[in-house]
Amino acid sequence: MNPTQDRPFVLAGVSGVRRVAQLTGPDSINHTDRVGIAGTDLGSMFEADGRVWFVFGDTFGRREPGFTGGGGDEWRSNALAHTTDTDPADGIVFDGFVVDEQGRARELLGSEKVDHSEMTVIPTYGFAANGAMYLAYMSVRHWGEPGEWEVNHAGLAKSVDHGQTWVKLAAPIWPGDGNFVQVSVAQVDGELYFWGVTHGRFGGVRLMKVAPAQVEAADAYRYFAGTASDGAPIWSSDPAAAHTIVEDTVGELSVVWNEHLSRWLMSYTNGGGAGASLREGLTPWGPWGDAITLVSAAAVPGLYSPYMLPRYTADGGRTIYFTLSVWDPYNVFWYRADLVSRA
């Protein structure tokens, strides 16, 4: 990868932003009440086994009319859907969910569900490596104030049976107050890159990488520690050496390569109140351009978690599609936007 960092930025903004479909909930195109999902959130995506997998957070089977935010009966800390739908233009139809014996979406990673001990376990992103599927997760102790939560630790879970069952790995483990509590994962030049943020939406982004074959070896991870005089990245085995590559109030991030721009794109919940933001990166470590509003909080109150996937684009990548969670009605929606390039 060319480490040159003096190229101009080309992303000027977005246009044509609109909601395409509702993906979860009884009124969605997937009618997820059929698998015991009345409300859920997140919806990050990854590819494995020839499918796209949608990863959801706290999930509830029944909710009273008018209920706002997370809550309800039949609580599961997480859920997983899969699809072979390749046309994002009209929304994504799920082929199915990982389900239990009753046909309800199964909780993949168990949790105590005890406040101030382990309230829940939330998967933040998934990826495939070594013939297995992995989920990065955070063990949430307490949700705390809006935009900040207390976390016990972050780690990885593994499935070797196509997502049907999952085991939390003993290693690697990252501290709950560190900068890799929530991550976005992509393969770059044969390695797995993890862009990470801390326990909420109030800090910046840092970067680490590992060879896929060593993903379960904690000491194999390398942390971006700045650049050399020629712009080449410097990698350290010390997590404390990790540099912040984006200074902002970043939560629930997603980083993908965009073919139209030939640039990296980072979408995230902006804890500063801007809604969902989008940035352009010249390399995985930057420099990163200024934040551009992808969807404003005024246009969609209660929005969070804008997640992208490279395959869900159109017009050579000029049009991007992404999931977006909305606190009321606490479900996941499908959006689209056109990227506007500088003249």
Image (cartoon, grey):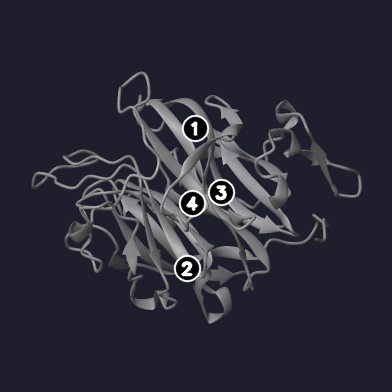
Residue in view at x 19 percent, y 52 percent: 38
User: Seen in the image, is 268 located left or right of residue 7?
Assistant: left
Which residue is at 17% across, 63% downward?
27
Looking at the image, is mark 4 or mark 2 earlier in the sequence? 2
Q: Is residue 20 left or right of residue 27?
A: right
Residue bearing mark 4: 277
Counting residues from the N terminus, which is met first, the one under dot 1 or under dot 4?
Answer: 1
Give the amino acid type for the residue marked by disc 2 in the picture. Arg
x, y percent for residue 317: 56, 74
Quadrant where the image shows the C terminus = bottom right
Q: Secondary structure at mark 4?
A: strand
Tag 1 or tag 2, which sits nearer the N-term? 2
Label 3 and label 2: CA atoms lie apart by: 18 Å
276 over 335 or under it: above or below: above
Is 111 placed above or below 260 here?
above
Amino acid at circle 1: Phe
Query: Residue 184 — which label?
Result: 3
* Type of amino acid under label 3: Ser
* Viewer-side residue, 329 vs 270: 329
Label 3 vs label 2, nearer the camera: 2
Q: Determine the CA span between mark 3 and mark 1.
A: 17 Å
Q: Secondary structure at mark 2?
A: strand
Amino acid type of the residue that numbered disc 4 sits on in the rendered structure: Ser
Looking at the image, residue 336 lies above or below residue 274: below
User: Where is residue 245 shown, x and y percent of the image?
Assistant: 68, 41
Circles 3, 1 touching at the beta carbon (< 8 Å): no
> Pointer 1: what residue?
202
Q: Residues within 10 Å of mark 3 (few under 14, many from 20)?
A: many
Quarter of the figure with residue 210: top right
Question: Badge 2 is on which residue?
Answer: 51
